[in-house]
């Protein structure tokens, strides 16, 4: 022990340090080391703080991107719903803008672009709506590096797809019993739907001894059924459903061709297309040549026991003119299968509403092939039309039945456009 102590003492003496000097040197070393750490920490803190600030701002911008994407998604979806209902560009843009605003987009510091169809991507179809949103956001911590604000960009595309088609559509938005099946009506819709755009509680009314068989029934309002409504694909029907778009809302109105034909009554005649300003009344065995019959005055009428036939025919009713077909008549009329009025058999003046009802009647061998299109007028369908190989779609302001009728869904071979009814809207981009 004494030897080791002596050796240690010799070591310190060889270093030229006394014990007290050695201790003083150690204390100075420890103090200097603590000072270095403090200096390093002082220089490092701004870097750490800046990193935390950048991370916080990046997280905030990510949150704003996500929120803007949600607004774009909602806007595209709302626009597609409006498009599905048959609205035009202005209404689609308004619906999209409203939805974007209600989901956090600020118009004061951003822009919105609504395109139908989309201008890019895999869904450039007229059934899709593209919404592009921008939002300008201020900088916070990164403002020390640049004064340029952050501009966020988000895009969304929504598409509606048809899952079924209608062959009966009532376009009125308010009428009670817009679709009315009563009496001894027996309406069989083979592979298609019946639709009403009315928001009334009884927008679709099946009552008493009336029977209606279809794939489905949709109404913007309610369904009143105390009769025989049988729906194979949606038992009970679909109330509060989206409206069905008018499939011919953009179809141009015919113009009268040639001079006014003042004769209105015919019995056993072969008629040609043209302008029948005083009406067209058929009472015997009459044939209509192809073309557009522009009918005014007392309208288009077929008397009891008459036999009327024609192929490639469109009958336009102007002003207060209406259709009247009496029972026991035999009517076999077919619409054009090509051209401007492809699939249109009867066309009611859009500017004429109210007034008399367009009455369709006939015997069990009668057959109408084509659209009965009366967008602002009532249609009463009492006959036994659309027999073997026949196709008829009915589009009216209101539509009612008290007779028997059979309808087919796929009339494309007859030049008739399908009428989308049950649709689904989804985000695709």
Image (cartoon, grey):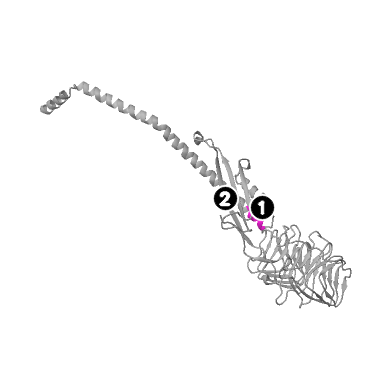
Above-or-below relation of 144 to 328: above
In the picture of the structure, the residue carrying the numbered disc 2 is 155
- Separation of residues labelled 1 and 2 (CA atoms): 16 Å
Side of 424 relative to 416 (left or right):
left
165 on left or right of 268: left
Q: Where is residue 65 drawn, in percent x and y?
A: 54, 45
Residue 254 picture location, percent across and down: 78, 63
Q: Residue at x 66, y 52 (%)?
A: 92
Magenta range is: 78-84
Q: Residue furthest front?
A: 258
Task: Please state, as top left, top right, bottom left or bottom right, where the C terminus lies in the image.
Answer: bottom right
User: Residue shown at 64%/48% (left/top)?
Assistant: 97
**Residue at coordinates 36% horizontally, 30% vertically from top-left?**
40
Give the quarter of the figure containing the N terminus.
Answer: top left
Q: Which percent across, then down, holds residue 281? A: 86, 71
Find out whether residue 81 is within the magenta segment: yes
Which quadrant of the figure has residue 382?
Answer: bottom right
Q: Position of residue 108 (x, y in %)?
A: 63, 40
388 w.r.t. 240: above or below? below
Residue 334 placement: quadrant: bottom right
Task: Check disc 1 and report the residue beneath it.
Answer: 92
Callout 2: 10 Å neighbours few (<14), some, many (20+)?
many
Q: Nearer the viewer, residue 223 or 136?
A: 136
């Amino acid at each position: 022990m004494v030897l080791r102590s002596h050796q240690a003492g010799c070591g310190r003496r060889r270093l030229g340090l006394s014990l007290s000097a050695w201790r003083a040197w150690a204390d100075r070393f420890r103090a200097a080391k603590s000072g270095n750490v403090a200096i390093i920490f002082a220089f490092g803190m701004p870097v750490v703080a800046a990193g935390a600030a950048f991370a916080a701002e990046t997280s905030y911008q990510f949150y704003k991107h996500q929120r803007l994407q949600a607004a774009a998604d909602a806007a595209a979806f709302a626009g597609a719903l409006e498009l599905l209902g048959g609205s035009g560009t202005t209404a689609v843009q308004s619906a999209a803008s409203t939805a974007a605003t209600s989901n956090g987009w600020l118009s004061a510091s951003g822009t919105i672009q609504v395109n139908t169809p989309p201008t890019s991507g895999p869904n450039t179809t007229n059934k899709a709506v593209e919404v592009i949103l921008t939002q300008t956001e201020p900088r916070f911590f990164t403002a020390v590096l640049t004064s340029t604000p952050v501009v966020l960009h988000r895009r969304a595309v929504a598409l509606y797809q048809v899952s079924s088609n209608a062959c009966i559509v009532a376009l009125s938005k308010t009428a009670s019993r817009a679709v009315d099946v009563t009496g001894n009506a027996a309406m069989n819709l083979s592979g298609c739907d019946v639709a009403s755009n009315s928001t009334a509680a009884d927008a679709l009314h099946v009552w008493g001894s009336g029977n209606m068989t279809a794939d489905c029934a949709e109404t913007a309002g309610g369904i009143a059924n105390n009769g025989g409504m049988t729906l194979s694909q949606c038992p009970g029907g679909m109330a509060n459903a989206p409206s069905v778009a008018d499939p011919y809302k953009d179809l141009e109105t015919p113009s009268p061709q040639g001079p006014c034909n003042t004769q209105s009554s015919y019995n056993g005649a072969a008629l040609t297309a043209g302008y029948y300003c005083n009406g067209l009344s058929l009472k015997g065995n009459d044939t209509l040549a192809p073309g557009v019959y522009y009918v005014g005055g007392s309208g288009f009428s077929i008397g009891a026991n008459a036999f009327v036939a024609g192929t490639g025919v469109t009958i336009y009713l102007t002003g207060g003119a209406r259709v009247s077909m009496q029972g026991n008549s035999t009517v076999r009329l077919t619409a054009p299968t090509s051209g401007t009025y492809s699939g249109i058999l009867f066309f009611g003046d859009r500017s004429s509403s109210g007034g008399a009802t367009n009455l369709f009647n006939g015997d069990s061998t009668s057959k109408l092939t084509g659209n009965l299109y009366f967008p602002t007028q009532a249609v009463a369908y009492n006959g036994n039309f659309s027999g073997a190989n026949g196709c008829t779609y009915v589009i009216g302001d209101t539509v009612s039945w008290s007779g028997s009728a059979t309808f087919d869904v796929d009339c494309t071979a007859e030049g008739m456009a399908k009428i989308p009814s049950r649709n689904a809207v989804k985000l695709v981009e």
